[in-house]
Amino acid sequence: MPVNSGTTDTGTGLSTTDSRRPVTWAPTEQFRTSTRMWDFMLWLGRTRGVDLNDYRELWRWSVTELSEFWAAVAEYFELIGDDLHGPALVEERMPGAVWYPGAHINYAENVLRHAADPALADTTAVLTIEEDNSTQTLTWRELETQVASFASALRQQGVRPGDCVAAVLPNVPEALIGLLATASIGAVWTINSPELSPSATLDRVRQLEPTVFIGSDGYRFNGKELGRLDHMAEVIEGLPTVEHVIVVRNLDPELSMPAGQTAFDEMASHTAAPYYERLPFDHPLWVLFSSGTTGQPKGIIHGHGGMLLEACKGTGLNQNMGPGDLYYVAANTSWMVWNTLVNNMASGAAVVTYAGSPTYGRKDRQFDVLASTGATMFGVGAAYLTLVERTGLEPGTDWDLSRLKSILSTGSPLPDSTWAWVHRAVKTDVHLGSDSGGTDICSGFIGSNPLEPVHLGELQGPLLGVAVQAWDDNGGSVVGDVGEMVITRPMPSMPVRFWDDPDASKYQAAYFEKYPGVWCQGDWITETPEGTFIVHGRSDATLNRQGVRLGSADIYAALEGIAEIQDSLVVGAEQPDGGYYMPMFVVLSEETELEDELIERVKQQIKNRTSARHVPDEIIQVPAIPKTHSNKRVEVPVKKLFAGVVPERAVNFTSLANPEAMQWFIEAAQHFHQKKA
């Protein structure tokens, strides 16, 4: 999909227009008119008399005629359920919007409806690849058969609608089978990665009081077998409500089951007729968890109907996924991005599961996976792309990426240099988009679409059905300046509620405290005059110099090209004396010293690429940057430490992937305050 004519070459491999940032991808007319989104617009004209000609017209209609739009999504994707023909949105308020009050639906039934399609039933639904590149497949028909068998076995164990099934599994097909089987019953699913410590796992799962636990004997990672039976035993010991334990035999297919435990493969190998419990539209589907960096992780409940609508809209329309596509996402099961596997399946796409190391053998291992599987779409954290960029590797030269059509970068803002590197070193005509959303909705707010060009460093625009704006502190819309990301009308995938929040006070405080009745996501964004967006980072970690608010992401982006800096973290901490302290912590490459010349070069580059206000007070070398389990920088706890908050209140160690890294910051903050005393 080459860049449209009418653009000019900048000499960097990208094209540009006179007044905009360079165009990195643009659809041809032939591609635009072949997309599901284009077909959806034509269908709207035929069935509803709505004449729409481009993405912006479609988006405006989707947020102006909100109820009609979501009803159209349900009808266009031929979703299965009872009483889905009434208005989609009956009561509009936030929180507490009422969607399809009389409808009954089942998420799993709609994902697996493709098994009844003669054109898809015997095609691949799930392709599993190992570190040695060996593969196994499940067809849609085989997947439905195993889901039906496993669900029947769960019912025989007494699992009923509303019960909780908790899993600690890597990214393996059994995790997908377990989710779909649980959903088919109407029980509530939750999953965590086995790389989380037992205590971190219990911080999450114990809240839900599960009756069934699914674990594994281990998995292969980075060339080694990692046993998890001891880990599983420790977790189970902390879950007194568990009545049944199920074990996925990844490492030893002949592993004997002790009393009280059942092998997953045995439960999934019987003959049983598929049966799907049709449930109220907002019946709980799964529980995802907030990062929990400053307290106990919050359980976020999504409903069957809302998640299904969002899945079809997001993957089927905005991402242009469907039958014939193969989706691979580089995510462990603790990150909401893993759930996008089943969301893509809802649109008819097949998916790849991979439990191995993302850097096994070499740093660009993920591109080997893409080539070996023939994946058409790659979902990945921005940090991984930057990691590969810094190695100097050129995946597009070494791997056959001819089937790869699109890359969805998420998790954090994508630096401009990495954006350009993807088109230079991975694939020139790949549709690289950066999306911004969250665990909160298990989807996106702003991001990609297949009908418009992509400009370097910019998110293409608001996603369909998302009434997003940037607001100032007074609740006024701002364009061309930094503001809070807000959503002014409901989305069906907004949480049904939080777990253990009977009066909705936690839910209210999380999103609606700053602007009553309007969802505030906690991200700083800029909406450009052209309707694209730039994300600056979390607003709760916002830097504030002399009354001017700054995004930490802008400083990280300014460090591009300084090879000596491998990682960085910047925080701004208000001081008890009224002062403001803004240090930047850096991890340096091997054998690099933090000398005056490097410090000055870093400060000058930040100043030149942003402003003098963005230059930190100090640049401090550290052994490592603390990260969450989804590989995000942990800014707020570090900010609190340097603001004088005691470690016990500032940091939740179980939320960290590398808790040992935080110890350095605790000691440094204590030393900082001692010097000031």
Image (spheres, helix red, strand yellow):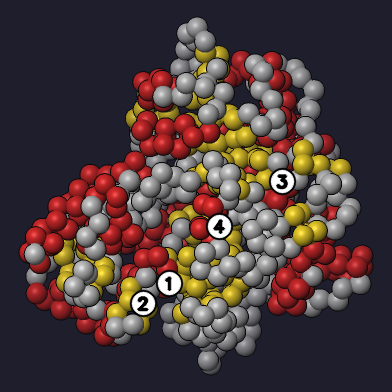
Of labels 1 and 4, the one closer to you: 4
Q: Are marks 4 and 2 in contact (CB under 8 Å)?
A: no
For the residues carrying marks 1 and 2, which lies nearer the camera in this image? 2
Give residue 443's position: percent from left, percent from top: 59, 56
User: Quadrant location of the N terminus?
Assistant: bottom right
Q: Residues within 10 Å of mark 1 (few under 14, many from 20)?
A: many
- In this rendering, is residue 296 above or below 624? above
- Taking depth in this image into account, of 255 and 284 the one nearest to the observer is 284
Q: Residue under label 1, please give it.
A: 536
In whole angstroms, how far apart are the C-alphas of marks 1 and 4?
24 Å
Where residue 591 appears, as percent x and y from the top left, is 12, 58
Three-letter code, disc 1: His
Q: Residue at x 59, y 60 (%)?
A: 444
- Residue at mark 1 to residue at mark 3: CA–CA distance: 33 Å
Q: According to the image, label 3 marks what residue? A: 282
Q: In the displayed structure, does residue 155 sit left or right of residue 223?
A: right
Q: Secondary structure at mark 3?
A: loop
Does the CB distance between marks 3 and 4 fall below 8 Å? no
Residue extending farthest top: 259
> Badge 4: few (under 14), some or many (20 or more) residues near its Cα, within 10 Å?
some
Residue where numbered disc 2 is placed: 550
Residue 209, given in percent of the width and then of the height, sits at 53, 29
Query: Label 4 near label 1: C-beta < 8 Å?
Result: no
Q: Position of residue 242 (x, y in %)?
A: 52, 21
Q: Is residue 380 visible?
A: yes
Residue 508: give its label.
Answer: 4
- In front here: 109 or 643? 643
